[in-house]
Every structure is written in C-alpha cells, then in structure tokens.
C-alpha cells in the first residue's frame, strides 16, 4: 500500500469517525424515555382469602382492564403434607385452595367479558419454607392452571397464568431464594402457555442507596432472581416517591441493569396501600427514565380484597 | 478546508483513535439499552396484546367441567402470631411478631417491630380489615422512640403487653388503637 493510499484512507476514517461519534451521541440522546405515557395500571392485591365468591368477584371487577397483575398470597409454607402459603390473614392456604381461587378469578374474568390478562400468582421469599421444593410446587400449580385455561374451550387467547415472587433482599438469603427459582425453573412449562414468573421484589440497600444490598445479597443475586433465572421477568417495586432521596428504587434497578442488562417487564407500585408512595404513573416514569426502557406493564398493589 | 496529512501525520493516529472510540461508545450505548440482556429470553412476553377473542361477553359460557371448590381451612389465627410477615416493604420495617383479633366485626392486626433503617426505633402498626377481608386499611403507625425493637409478649382481652429490646414495657389497647 502506498503512503498516498494510507493518507486517503486516514482522511476517510477521520470523516467516518466524526460521523460515528455524532451518531453515537445522537443515539445516546435518544435513549431516555421521559415523557412516554405509562400504560394503564392494573390492580394487584395482597390476597387475604381463597373464598371463591370473593376472589371471583375480583376477577369480574378486573374484566374491564387489560395487562398483567399480581395476586400475592404470602410466604411459602408447608402444612398437613402439602405446600401453600402462610397468608397475610394468618392462616394456611394450600396450593389446592389457591388454585381453586385462581380458577374462580379467571372464570369470572372471562365470563364478565375480559379480553387480555396475565394473572401472576404470587408468593414471597419471606423465610418460612422458601426453597426448591416450594418453587417446584408453585410452578406445578401455575402449569396446572394454564392447562385448565387451555382445556376446551380454550381461553388462552384471553387469559394466561404466571407465577410471581416478592423476592426481597431483607428476607431469605440469596442462596435460599435462588433455590426457590431453581425449583421453579425445573418444573415450569410452555406446553399451554409459558408459566414464567415475575420478580416483584426489591433491591433494598443496593447502590446508589448504599454501598451494598441489604441481607448480604449482591447486585448479581438480584439480577439472577429477576432475569438470569430462565423463567424470570423483572416487575420490580418502585415505591419511593422523591423527595428526599430522589427516585432511589428506580436508580437501584438501573445500577443493576448497567452491570447486568435486563429488560423490565413491568413496574409495581403500592399507592393504594400507602398514599405517600409513588402513583403508578410516577413509579413507571421513574423506572422508564432511569433505565431508558418502556416497561410493558404497570400495576398497583392494594390491601383490599 | 483541506487537511494535509503529509504535514499533519498525527491526524492519522487521531483518526484511528476516534474510530476506535466511536466503536466503543456505540457498543456501550447498545449495552446500556439492554439489548445484550435479551439473549435467551422470550421477548413475546413484552408484546402488546393483539385482540384475537371474538366471542362476545353474552355468548361466553363456563368450562363444561367445573373446578373443585377448595376445602375450607381452619381459618385465621386468633391472638399472638410469632411470624414476621407483614404487607409492608421489607426495607421499611423489621416486624418481630403480631397479634390479631376480631373486634366489633373487624379484624384488627397489630404488628410490632422496629424501623429497618434504625432498629433502635420501635414501631407499632395497626391494619384494620373487614370480617371477610374484603377491605383493609393501615389505621395507625406509631413510632415509640428509641426504646429498641418492640415485641408483643402477652395479651389480655384487647390490651397487649409489649416489651422493647431496650427493656421498656409498654401497653397497647388494640380496640382504642393507642398506648395506655
């Protein structure tokens, strides 16, 4: 190659570099999604009953809405030879009871004219029987509900079941919580509809709020539960309304996302349970702005049943 | 403007550096957007719903085989419950235990513990629900001061004896929802 050719090549590269840098800057500028409209928020619940009439009425009431929502039944529990949850109302609900209640909810959602819902059936990692066996039992239940939805006449074009776990770093250890996810992942199926689970947990204490996550968890542990586990999709709690600390929950999740990229499926707020916390729109905007993503769903959790 | 690379050979080096930098920046932007993290995931989970159901509400019928109604359980516990579960963000409170009872047709749940951020700051939270749990509200949040984490140790009627980790003894009337 002659020196003239090198010089010509360098000239082209110089111009290309300027263009590339300009384009990169433009792309970086385009990333923030501030100002995008949040999706309509659905109603999630801390469920305190498995009464089929009460829960069925909730399904009918939800028929006018679409999207994803979480019904959380409480901490993993084992009693009388079966898995289930220790509920917020301080009673044991077996998997069979929860499954019956969820079928009541789904039946009424369909019969009352609902058009599209992903119903995530939730537990937590709040000590108790958090672990692999409970994760497997939970996935078995979600698979069974999807099989029931798909049974003739199939309602899968209207509704699908998912699992959910409120995985909070302050509760069970990262390793025990990961065992729950591994148990779930070993059983979940896509035979009828994929029985994924939504991580509705927190990133308490994680940077930038603190130097490390609470409970001995690492940012990678949080990422594992929310995204790296095969059936996992992140639906994090974005509760805290600035001031004084700024949109810290969203910033914590973005700090994890910057290290271990993931796509956020939804945003969970609890304005109906705590009027001082983010509204659904505020929570969604904070995560969207922090991550430059546009989560598909927004849901607000309430104590009311 | 004409750039004479014969007189400015350093520009050749700068060009290489800039091209390399641009590639790195583009890579970083792509990474930050999360595209790398999508590998192996079913992105249809994020897809907006496409309406495919054409059956109007009036024409919808239940499944031909009804599902089995779940057998009733033993019902909620009455009295002190040695369990830290509570429907509050884990990063806000450390709950030690709780007490619940039906009072005047409403479930009153009293949670005792401390602030998560400062275990010296004792707290009592009261949630009141309808008898069928169809409605619930956070009725009261008390900060008891720097007495340490609170725990319910006894109940007589609706009066709860509460011990703090700092050694203080308190009495709380769940009916009045106030310290006595």
Image (cartoon, helix red, strand yellow):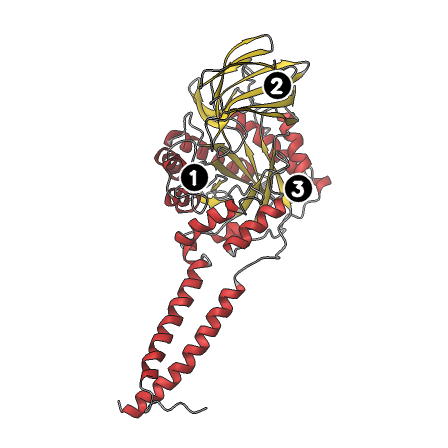
Relative to A10, does residue B123 appear above or below in the rendering?
A: above
Quarter of the figure with the C terminus of chain B: top right
Q: Position of residue A239 (x, y in %)?
A: 56, 41
Disc 1 from disc 2: Cα separation: 38 Å
Query: What is the chain letter for disc 2?
Result: B
Relative to B28, does residue B21 appear above or below in the rendering?
A: below
Q: Looking at the image, which is closer to me, A154 or A179?
A: A179
Q: Any mark on residue A208, and which?
A: none
Q: Residue at x 63, y 54 (%)?
A: A37
Q: Are marks 3 and 2 on the same chain?
A: no
Circle 3 sits on which residue? A114
Please tell me which of labels 3 and 1 falls first in the chain: 3
Circle 1 sits on which residue? A188
Q: Position of residue A184 (x, y in %)?
A: 41, 36
Report crowding for label 2: few under 14, some 14 to 19, many 20 or more residues within 10 A (C-alpha). many
Q: Is residue B26 left or right of residue A5?
A: right
Q: Position of residue B88 (x, y in %)?
A: 54, 31
Circle 2 sits on which residue? B108
Query: What is the chain letter for disc 3?
Result: A
Relative to A279, does residue A11 appear above or below in the rendering?
A: below
Q: Position of residue A86 (x, y in %)?
A: 49, 23
Q: Looking at the image, which is closer to me, B169 or B113?
A: B169
């Amino acid at each position: 190659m002659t020196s003239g050719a090198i010089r010509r090549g360098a000239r082209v590269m110089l111009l290309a570099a300027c263009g590339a840098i300009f384009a990169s800057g433009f792309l970086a500028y385009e990333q923030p999604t501030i100002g995008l409209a949040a999706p309509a928020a659905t109603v999630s619940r801390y469920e305190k009953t498995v009464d089929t009439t009460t829960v069925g009425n909730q399904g009918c009431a939800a028929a006018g809405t679409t999207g994803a929502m979480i019904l959380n039944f409480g901490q993993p529990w084992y009693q009388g030879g079966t898995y289930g949850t220790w509920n917020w109302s301080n009673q044991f609900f077996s998997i069979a009871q929860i499954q019956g209640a969820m079928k009541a909810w789904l039946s009424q959602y369909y019969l009352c004219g609902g058009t599209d819902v992903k119903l995530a059936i939730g537990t937590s990692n709040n000590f108790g029987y958090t672990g692999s066996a409970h994760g497997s039992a939970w996935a078995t239940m979600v698979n069974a509900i999807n099989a029931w939805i798909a049974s003739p006449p199939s309602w899968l074009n209207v509704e699908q079941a998912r699992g959910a776990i409120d995985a909070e770093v302050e509760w069970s250890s990262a390793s025990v919580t990961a065992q729950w996810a591994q148990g779930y992942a070993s059983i979940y199926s896509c035979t009828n509809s994929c029985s994924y689970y939504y991580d509705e947990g927190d990133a308490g204490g994680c940077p930038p709020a603190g130097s490390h996550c609470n409970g001995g968890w690492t940012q990678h542990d949080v990422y594992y539960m929310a995204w790296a586990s095969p059936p996992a999709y992140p639906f994090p709690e974005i509760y805290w309304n600035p001031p004084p600390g700024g949109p810290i929950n969203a910033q914590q999740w973005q700090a994890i996302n910057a290290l271990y990229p993931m796509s956020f499926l939804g945003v969970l707020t609890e304005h109906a349970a705590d009027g001082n916390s983010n509204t659904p729109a505020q929570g969604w905007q904070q995560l969207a702005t922090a991550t430059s993503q546009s989560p598909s769903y927004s849901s607000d959790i309430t104590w009311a049943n | 403007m004409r750039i004479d690379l014969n007189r400015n050979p350093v520009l050749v080096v700068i060009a290489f550096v800039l091209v390399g930098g641009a590639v790195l920046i583009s890579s970083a932007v792509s990474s930050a957007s999360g595209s790398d993290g999508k590998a192996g995931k079913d992105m249809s989970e994020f897809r907006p719903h496409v309406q495919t159901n054409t059956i109007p509400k009036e024409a919808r019928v239940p499944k031909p085989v009804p599902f089995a109604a779940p057998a009733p359980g033993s019902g909620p516990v009455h009295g002190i419950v040695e369990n830290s579960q509570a429907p509050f963000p884990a990063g806000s409170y450390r709950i030690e235990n709780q007490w619940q009872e039906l009072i005047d047709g409403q479930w009153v749940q009293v949670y005792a513990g401390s602030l998560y951020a400062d275990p010296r700051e004792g707290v009592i939270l009261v949630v009141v629900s309808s008898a069928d749990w169809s409605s619930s509200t956070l009725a009261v949040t008390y900060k008891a001061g720097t007495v340490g984490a609170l725990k319910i140790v006894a109940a007589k009627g609706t009066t709860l004896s509460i011990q703090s980790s700092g050694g203080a003894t308190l009495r709380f009337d769940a009916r009045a929802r106030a310290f006595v």
